[in-house]
Image (spheres, grey):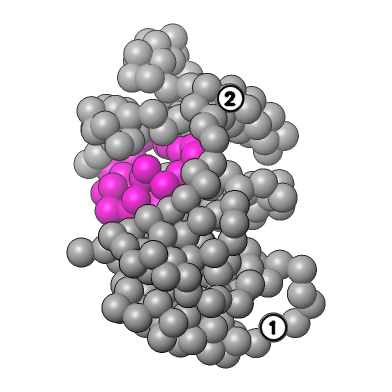
Amino acid sequence: MNEYRILVVDDEEDLCEILKFNLENEGYEVDTANSAEEAMKMNIAAYDLLLLDVMMGEISGFKMASMLKKEKKTEKVPIIFITAKDTENDTVTGFNLGADDYISKPFSLREVSARVKAVLRRTHQEVSVEEPQQLEYRSLVLDVAKKKVCIDGAEVPLTKKEFEILLLLLKNKGRVFSREDILARVWSDEVYVLDRTIDVNITRLRKKIGEYGKCIVTRLGYGYCFETE
């Protein structure tokens, strides 16, 4: 199972669901959006790859890509264009906008899988960096290697699950994780765990980290995230 996140942006809902289903079977974490407008409200920088349809409503895939390439935080997010148009001019336009690949409809799912793997392998090697051994927010310091958390220099005694929840949220500040996400990432080796278990661990974690407990925010109906001021 890999950790790559993919965003599929296409105004054909059925196609989005087909791609989501098949890519998730490949081990990717996949989200979908049915318009560029919807996608632009999401945290694009959090994704490792965009599968982007060219022909959409007011904001086309080309226009959206152009907007993303102008923003520092999203300029390096790889893009594979998906389109029913396969003329040479369109292909050139896509690559001039910084596309990493181009798939013409209709396509086979095996082709999509192969191209996704190739782009991720290439771009991941290019931007691969060593994982940080220490995460900090103000006086809250999480030491990944030593598996300990300190606040103002004093160690905070956390259980293994509490530490892993805090690591997940702190490493991905601002990103909301559902209970299912947390269960899959923190309790991945356990057969049956109640959703309530997540809530209990979050409650204990909030108490243990004192003033920083308020940074672990509940998004009703969605999950939890670590928010900074």
Residue 125's disc number: 2
Position in image of residue 138 (x %, y %): 28, 60
Residues rendered magenta in the picture: 31-57
Residue 26's disc number: none
Q: Residue 162 vs residue 37: left or right?
A: right
Residues marked 2 and 1 touching at CB (< 8 Å): no
Label 2, label 1: how far apart the Cα atoms are: 36 Å
Q: Nearer the viewer, residue 11 or 167?
A: 167
Quarter of the view holding residue 209: bottom left
Position in image of residue 213 (x %, y %): 35, 78
Q: Which residue is mark 1?
A: 193
- Asked if residue 148 can be seen in this view, the reply is yes
Image: 151 above or below 211:
above
User: Residue at position x 60%, y 77% from top?
Assistant: 159
User: Residue at position x 67%, y 35% from top?
Assistant: 113
Q: Secondary structure at mark 1?
A: loop
Image: 54 above or below 180:
above
Q: Nearer the viewer, residue 81 or 191?
A: 191
Residue at the front extreme, as displayed = 153
Task: Find out whether residue 49 is within the magenta segment.
Answer: yes
Quarter of the view holding residue 53: top left
Task: Find out whether residue 95 is within the magenta segment.
Answer: no
